[in-house]
């Protein structure tokens, strides 16, 4: 399989890069955010919902500011379905040439789903199975330009709040 780097700064399979390059030739075809129909899923991974959409809308609204800072490393902690990190890569697009992406999650299913979501959009990131950024502190110290975090929010029923065993 041939690997190459696209104009988006993403290393990807040959066929995906050709698709990206065709889309860059006519920017109107390049989606500004991840397409929900291409977001992979798994029973043990939260699907994107309103908070994910609001975060991505915020990133989209702040696109000019993000690009003015010339990020070289963007990171998502708790990548889940991959919707946010994929959207960030698409939002920065060709103007974010040279940006590297890292996404972490403690859930192996989430890492797999994020890989599938990114692959479906022709985007690549280094995906790491870890708790938050455990073990990456020295490697990433001072290097992360943009960090996004959208932890799952699961309401706890009131009758459980005062009981033992609640860990989150």
Image (spheres, rainbow, N blue to C red):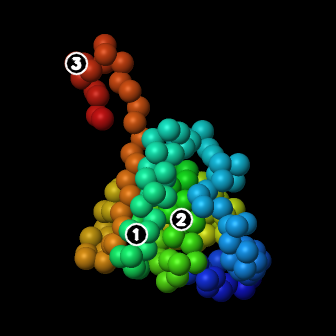
Which structural element holds mark 1?
helix
Q: Is residue 159 above or below residue 74?
A: above
Q: Identify the residue position indicated by label 1 in the image.
A: 66
Using the image, determine if residue 20 lies above or below residue 153: below
Q: CA distance from mark 1 to mark 3?
A: 42 Å
The residue under the point 68% across, 72% down is 27
Indicate left or right for 8 with 131 as reference. Answer: right
Q: Nearer the viewer, residue 40 or 74?
A: 74
Q: Quick check: can you spot residue 164? A: yes
Using residue 118 as the reference point, say whether residue 60 is left or right of it.
left
Q: Which of marks 2 and 1 precedes in the sequence?
A: 1
Residue 88, labelled with which disc? none
The answer to whether the residue labelled 1 contacts the one labelled 2, judged by CB atoms less than 8 Å apart, is: yes
Q: Is residue 55 above or below residue 71?
A: above
Foreground tag (2 vs 3): 2
Measure the alpha-carbon separation of dots 2 and 3.
42 Å
Q: Residue at x 63, y 82 (%)?
A: 6
Residue at coordinates 49% horizontally, 51% vertically from top-left? 57
What's the mark number on residue 91? Answer: 2
Whole-percent x and y of residue 128? 45, 65
Distance (Cα) linking label 1 and label 2:
10 Å
The residue wearing badge 3 is 162
Which residue is nearer to you in this view: 35 or 12? 35
Question: Which quadrant of the structure image shows residue 143?
Answer: bottom left
| Chain-order first, disc 1 or disc 3 | 1
Sequence-wise, the earlier of marks 2 and 3 is: 2
Residue 116 or residue 99, whichever sits in front: 99
Q: Quadrant of residue 72?
A: bottom left
The crowding category of the residue bearing disc 3, from other C-alpha atoms within 10 Å (few below 14, some 14 to 19, many at least 20), is: few
The x, y position of residue 97, in whole percent, is: 52, 82
């Amino acid at each position: 399989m041939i690997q190459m780097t696209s104009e988006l700064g993403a290393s990807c399979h040959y066929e995906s890069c050709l698709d990206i390059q065709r889309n860059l030739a006519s920017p109107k075809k390049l989606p500004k955010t991840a397409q929900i129909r291409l977001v992979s899923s798994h029973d043990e991974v939260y699907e994107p919902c309103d908070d994910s959409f609001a975060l991505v809308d915020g990133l989209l609204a702040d696109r000019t500011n993000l690009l003015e800072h010339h990020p070289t490393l963007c990171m998502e902690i708790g990548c889940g379905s991959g919707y946010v990190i994929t959207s960030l890569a698409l939002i920065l697009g060709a103007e974010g040439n040279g940006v590297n992406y890292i996404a972490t999650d403690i859930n192996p299913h989430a890492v797999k789903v994020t890989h599938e979501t990114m692959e479906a959009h022709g985007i690549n990131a280094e995906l790491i199975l870890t708790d938050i950024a455990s073990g990456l502190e020295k490697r990433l110290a001072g290097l992360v330009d943009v960090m996004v975090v959208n932890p799952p929010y699961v309401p706890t029923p009131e009758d459980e709040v005062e009981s033992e065993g609640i860990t989150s």
